[in-house]
Image: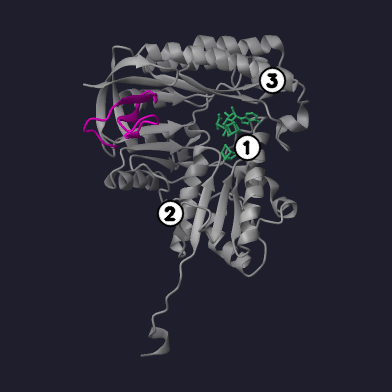
Amino acid sequence: MLLDEIPVKTATKNLYIETYGCAMNVSDSEIVASVMLESGFTAIDNEFDADVIFINTCSIREGAETKIWNRLTQLKHLKKKKPELLVGVLGCMAERLKTKLLEKEQLVDVVAGPDSYRDLPNLVMQAEDGNKAVNVLLSREETYAELSPIRLNSNGVTAFISIMRGCNNMCSFCVVPFTRGRERSRDAQSIVKEAQDLWNDGYKEVTLLGQNVDSYNHEGISFANLLEMTAQVSPTLRVRFSTSHPKDITDDVLHVIAKYNNICNYIHLPMQSGNSRILELMNRNYTREWYMDKVNRIREIIPGCGISTDVIVGFCGETEEEHQDSLSLMGWANFDFAYMYAYSERPGTLAARQFADDVSEADKARRLTEIILQQTRKSTEQNKRFIGKTVRVLVEGFSKKSKDDLMGRSDENIVTVFPKSNHKPGDYVNVLVEKTTTTSLIGQVV
Ligand code: SAM
Ligand code: SF4
Ligand code: F3S
């Protein structure tokens, strides 16, 4: 037997990935897993048995970064017990802080921005040799199109597909264009293939992801085209998407949603503010009236469509009257759901450079409470419209409260809970809604 034929038992190394932030980051962690598993790592679900820990981070608000600093402090204790453990900071915070992450904590070994994930095995190797390893280059081309994401923590029913990366919008409050770089769309065929592969693997729902899906464009294929191509994979593959920008969403997209039963009647349409002056300062490129027109158009073309939103209170210079405009627009729009935030200044953004963050923390907190209270009432009211109606639900798993009940989401993206009976994840069921809460519908399968 020749020497190089002697079987060598190479112990694989364990990788634990922890993900913070938005769905794009969840999707990116699946790409990271794909790259790392390809180079011999095994993904595990706990930090204690890990040889390498990656924290995929978010910078969207100060609080998001504070959370990660706290987590890094915890990991310091783990590293004390196990000095050979390598810790990598990935994602938006890595991109924003770059080598500062190495200076501030004597803990981080690898820093990798969102466009450098193919380089991770190499960066880990450098770190194993005792060198700090950093790659925060942003790319104009990288879409990781041909990589097959490893669906970590998957329920086997729903999956994300990234259709584009980066953002060209430069909303003045937002750090994303700085952490994720220029917008680029992924080749449509590779997206449809990923949807088809998921379908073949038993998945029943895909969510197409981008910071601004309506500006998707690849070799003349628009988002409306892509949505239609994905819906055609199978009539029983549900298709969702996020996020739509009010300035870019087109009637074409709305008509495609209306045409296909398997494209969910649900649109996440961040308004950010109900006041046109503030919207201009935010560089959102639409007015209150434009936003109202879009909501009307959605309800005209897709009757019963679920709509949710994002709102920021206390943006630079926001007066009490301007805050009232946000309350009144939210009241008018009847959103099913809203993600609501107090403005958090992000270093380097247009707003941080141009405007004073001059609404007091107390006013921000009060305004946030006001919109949350109003939206809670609205969501409760909105959900009541389903009582006595039947909704189609894709079963995702057990309900949070009881193993006797299952949960899934309605077409409009509302969590629906019903007795388990003999149903299982991946089934479609029709649920007659008997009662509702602020966040869910409860009923019986009919
Ligand atoms: N691309 C999407 C859009 O255009 O709406 C979402 C971007 S961001 C990941 C999600 C939400 O975070 C935003 O819609 C906004 O409401 C909020 N956000 C972003 N920057 C913020 C900041 N500096 N302070 C508070 N909230 C912020
Ligand atoms: Fe940020 Fe605006 Fe881009 Fe959304 S569209 S990611 S809010 S810059
Ligand atoms: Fe997402 Fe946070 Fe980055 S919201 S794009 S992970 S800053």
Mark 2 belongs to which amino acid? Leu
From the top left corner, tell me how far across and down residue 255 is, in percent.
36, 23
Q: Is residue 104 visible?
A: yes
**Category of crowding for the residue at label 1, using alpha-carbon neighbours closer than 10 angstroms: few (below 14), some (14–19), many (at least 20):** some
| Residue pointed to by mark 1 | 64
Ligand 1 falls in which quarter? Answer: top right
3 vs 2, front mark: 3
From the top left corner, tell me how far across and down residue 271 is, in percent.
56, 21
Locate the N terminus by quadrant: bottom left
Q: Residue at x 42, y 13 (%)?
A: 382
Mark 1 belongs to which amino acid? Ala
Which segment did they paint magenta?
Answer: 396-425
2 vs 1, front mark: 1
Locate the C terminus by quadrant: top left
| Residue pointed to by mark 3 | 364
Q: Earlier in the sequence, mark 2 or mark 1?
A: 1
Q: Earlier in the sequence, mark 3 or mark 2?
A: 2
How far apart are the two marked residues, 1 and 3, measured between alpha carbons?
17 Å
